[in-house]
Image (cartoon, rainbow, N blue to C red):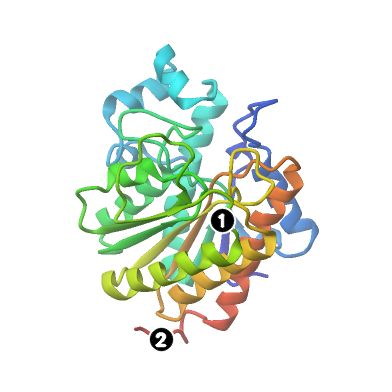
Amino acid sequence: MLPFKLIYHPQYDLNLGAHVFPSQKFRLIAETLLSEKIATRDDFLEPEKAADEDLLRVHTPEWVTKLKTGTLTASDIMKLEIPYSSELREAVWLAAGGSILAGQSALRDGFACNIGGGFHHAYPNHGEGFCAIHDVAVAIRRLLHDKSIQRAIVVDTDVHHGNGTAAIFAKDPTVFTLSIHQENNYPAHKPPSTVDLNMDDRAADAEYLDALLPAVERGLNEFRPDTVFYIGGADPFCEDQLGGLSLTKKGLLERDRRVFEQARKRNIPVVTTLAGGYARRVEDTVRIHINTVLAARELAAAFPKSAATTN
């Protein structure tokens, strides 16, 4: 049994069919965690859909209504880059509910993993890059509303810049945003995060970690957040179809482990969500995401909530 909860719903699958975004990965991750006995069924919590009032702390009423009623324009769908369907609507409402539940669980247990979410390209009034609802922003705003936290850090390790995150929290002093990404990649317009780490094409493990880890440490020391939301991208992987970095599976596991270590030794709860991953073999993407859960298990054991020390 894991010392923290995994948040998952079978309807996380966007049912996209033959699409570069492998939304079946959510199911495959859950199945692999069980089949490899990394987790038991008791480790899983099933989320409810986020309430509209939670979404409206981030998104405009017009955008929420469009998604609920399926009245997106051709321009909306072009930006979103995935077809609209009832499955999409259900999945993004559930992913937002999942990230809220993961945030609440992490505050109790020190860690929680949403096996979904991380839809960091969604803006308040439109979707972009396969992202319709910004589940992480919704979760942070809910925790702030509930006064469960006062400050949060988002550490975004997707190969693509977290443009929606940066835009949503640009004028919010309660949220620190860090994005490490390939500079010469999607999106073309990158609004500034609190900290942007722009990596050169084909940057590999050592260069990447040498940029990320000191920035995370400084952010934690100076901002002193109450929780970390970690968007764990699998797409910095060297064989990713939509990425141009050169990280190995070993380097990505070390990335996860070292970021989690920095947070947990300060007694800061960590919420992990997934993000992009478009490897030619979906098994590689699944394995990278599984490794994020394994890194969380390792650091949860090394720094249990009751024994971690504050900085």
The percent position of residue 148, horizontal first and vertical second, equals 30, 63
Could you tell me which secondary element the residue under label 1 belongs to?
loop
Checking the image for residue 203, the label placed there is: 1
Question: Farthest residue in the right direction?
Answer: 35
Q: In this view, does 118 lie to the left or right of 13?
A: left
The percent position of residue 58, horizontal first and vertical second, equals 30, 40
Q: Residue at x 57, y 27 (%)?
A: 87
Residue 164 visible at all: yes
The percent position of residue 120, horizontal first and vertical second, equals 43, 43
Along the line of sight, the residue nearer the viewer: 294 or 89: 294
Q: Residue at x 69, y 58 (%)?
A: 41
Along the line of sight, the residue nearer the viewer: 155 or 251: 251
Checking the image for residue 7, the label placed there is: none
Residue 4's quadrant in the figure? bottom right
Mark 2 sits on what residue?
309
- Which part of the image, by quadrant, shows the C terminus? bottom left
The count of marks equals 2
Along the line of sight, the residue nearer the viewer: 277 or 202: 202
Mark closest to the chain's N terminus, 1 or 2:
1
Please state which of the two labelled residues, at mark 1 or mark 2, is closer to the viewer.
Answer: 1
Tag 2: residue type?
Thr
The correct choice, above or below, for 302 with respect to 22 in the image is below
Graded by Cα atoms within 10 Å as few (under 14), some (14 to 19) or many (20 or more), the crowding at tag 1 reads some
The correct choice, above or below, for 196 with respect to 127 in the image is below
Is there CB contact under 8 Å for labels 1 and 2? no
The percent position of residue 286, horizontal first and vertical second, equals 70, 50
Residue 23's quadrant in the figure? top right
- Which part of the image, by quadrant, shows the N terminus? bottom right
Along the line of sight, the residue nearer the viewer: 187 or 171: 187
Tag 1: residue type?
Ala
The correct choice, above or below, for 300 with respect to 168 in the image is below
Q: Residue at x 37, y 39 (%)?
A: 51
